[in-house]
Image: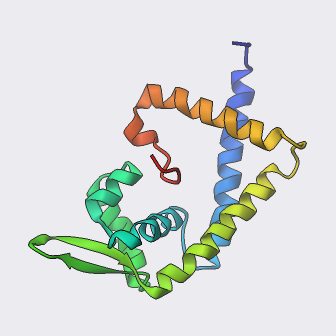
Amino acid sequence: MEAVDVTRLNSALNTLSKLYRAAKAERLAELGLHPGQDVLLWLLAEADPEGGMSISALAARLGIEPATATRSLARLERSGLFSREPVPGDRRQVRIRLTDRGRELVPVIERIWDDLAVVTTSSLAPGEGRALVGMLDRANDGLREVIGDRAARSVLVAD
């Protein structure tokens, strides 16, 4: 492996992360959402054909604790973006399902993600975007080895 200027690498990664999050937050705010809520809605939409998702399944998919998922869902519930439905035969469990309003936001969220990808890679030469994705995938694999798969799994890629 070639020597890397670690200060420059850390600075570039931190800057990219902050700029991407700020751009995402600005666009999501137009929908009344915060970063992270877009992923929750997207996962619920993905699970909707199967009848929704339990909070514990959602938490597992996100790599967070169920209590954290419950807190994250509270704002979305107040906005009427999902409903809770009892699980037949298990009074302790509920399934989370998107409402029509929540479902309508998902294609808008996906367009925001697409636009952010275009903006993020717009200054790259042809072919560099694909190369960047490959390099980031390999870098993520290296980090997964250090911190474990549960915390590092991408929620946007099917396992």
Above or below for 128 versus 92 = above
Applied colour scheme: rainbow
97 displayed left or right of 135: left
Residue at the image position 45 percent from the left and 64 percent from the top = 43
Q: Position of residue 103 (x, y in %)?
A: 50, 80
Residue at the image position 88 percent from the left and 48 percent from the top = 123
Classify residue 128 by image quadrant: top right
Closer to us: 28 or 115: 115
Q: Position of residue 46 (x, y in %)?
A: 45, 66
Residue farthest to the front, as pictured: 49
Q: Can residue 133 be seen at all in this image of the molecule?
A: yes
Classify residue 67 by image quadrant: bottom left
Q: Can residue 26 be seen at all in this image of the molecule?
A: no
72 displayed left or right of 108: left
* Total numbered circles: 0
Above or below for 103 versus 18 = below
Closer to us: 130 or 67: 130
Q: Position of residue 117 (x, y in %)?
A: 73, 56
Residue at the image position 45 percent from the left and 46 percent from the top = 159
Residue at the image position 64 percent from the left and 56 percent from the top = 21
Above or below for 78 versus 111 = below
| Quadrant in which the N terminus appears | top right
100 displayed left or right of 132: left
124 displayed left or right of 24: right
Q: Position of residue 151 (x, y in %)?
A: 41, 41
